[in-house]
Image (cartoon, rainbow, N blue to C red):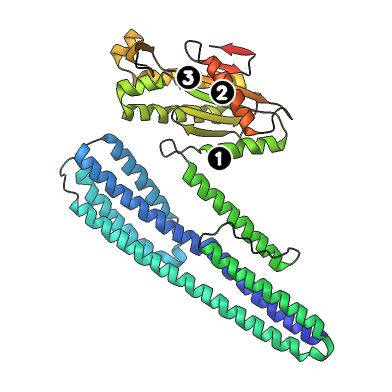
Amino acid sequence: MALFTMAALVFAILGLFSLNRTAREIAGNDLVFIDSVNKLRESVLAQERYAGKYSVLKEADFVELFRRREAEVKDFLSGFDTSRHLADKQALDKMYADFLEKSAPVFTGKTTDIAPLQNASKRIVTFLDKLYTHERTTLGAKLRSADQKESSTVRWSLLLALSGIILAIAVAALSIFNISSAITKLQNATQRIAEGDFDHDPQIPGGDEIGRLAQDFSRMAARLKVMEQISLDASPLTRLPGNIAIERAVSRRLADGKPFAVYYADLDNFKAYNDHYGYVQASDVIKISAEVIHQAVRKIADSEAFVGHVGGDDFVIVADAEPAESLCKQIIADFEAEIVKHYSAEDLARGAIEGVDRYGVERVFPIMTISIAVVLCSSGEYSMTTEIAKAAAQIKDYVKGFPGSNYLINRRKANR
């Protein structure tokens, strides 16, 4: 019983280790590489679109967007697995260099013909499509190999176990059933995660090697889902996390049970500025505001502090409560030093701009300022993020009633 049972178990465990290696390779290399190829393809096509728009509209924003995508492409190329894709990387480097060379005349104004750039982009996209197809084929081959390994493991395990059936039929049958079931679930989990089903639960109990591997799969899938949500939720303008990440950051602080603060920052008279100067300059103000807030938080707040962009001209900071006053003062000082650079000399001399309010009434609007509402969250004071948001909205409505840039911490104190 001991001899045949141990032989069956050893063979099964070796098969599981092999599947474990395959699964980790798929999760750590193949899926990441496929995702990188997709993102690289998207960035190149985006650059082609920006160049085309620039050739027609001559807007400097499209040059900046093109350069950002260029940085993304170079980052993706630098992260290529050269141990397996060295030749592919070299080919992509060469094609992308040609793509950048074709884009130069467009941005320098020497030509408006983007056909050469489109041809260069098409070559890159075609190459990436072939690379994507090849990698998917390789992934399919690995999955088929895992299927064969599963079948082989089950077959030999059954054979060895049945050799000792007279002495251990009940024990052998139970062991093989458990191993076969776990291998099948593990294989199915690998396929489901490879297809993007991050919520799939292999339903393998913990306590052994398979259980720990299943837990690794679940943690990996959860992390991939979070990364996907954060990527989709992030503001395309400021690249700061959006509402989903903000709620997660507040909920995590509430769960910790330690005092913290939620800061709601809102730009005053932003709509009038947008109507007066246009959405391009208004977008620049939003980006600059995000940078000002982010830099102030990095300078003064704790290392775990979080900065998010709700949308429009609203921002949220989740950080410790101790530096609330100094952080608000730093943000206001930096914002007021920066915002004057985005007004004309005439408007700055007048100290205001003319515009129409939300009710259609012509008014004079002062130079843009910033209002910050701070909600101090002591242990047990709030239990839900909606309660904090409601308290912050009340504070923000109050503090925006004062002229100039202000902050208000709970309802206790307002400063300019």
At 60% across and 40% down in the image, what residue appears? 248
Which residue position is annotated with label 1?
A: 245
Q: Position of residue 133 (x, y in %)?
A: 39, 68
Query: Mark 1 or mark 2, which is nearer to you?
Result: 2
Residue at 74% in and 67% down: 208
The image quarter in which residue 59 lies: top left
Residue with the mark numbered 2: 393
Q: CA distance from mark 3 to mark 2?
A: 15 Å
Residue type at the position of mark 3: Ile
Sort mark 3 into few (<14), some (14-19) or many (20+) by Cα contacts within 10 Å.
many
Q: Quadrant of residue 28?
A: bottom right
Within-10-Å neighbours for mark 1: few <14, some 14–19, many 20+: many
- The disc label shown at residue 370, or none: 3
The amino acid sitting under disc 2 is Ala
Check disc 1 and report its element: helix, strand or loop: helix
Type of the residue with mark 1: Ala
| Residue found at x 33% / y 58% | 93
Q: Which residue is more in the foreground, 83 or 192?
A: 192
- Horizontal side of 148 relative to 50 (left or right) equals right
Which of the two marks, 3 or 2, is nearer to us in this view? 2
C-alpha separation, residue under disc 1 versus residue under disc 2 = 19 Å
Whichever of labels 1 and 3 marks the residue nearer the N terminus, that label is: 1
Percent of width and height locating residue 234: 47, 41
Q: Nearer the viewer, residue 136 or 93?
A: 136
Q: In the image, is residue 47 above or below residue 284?
A: below
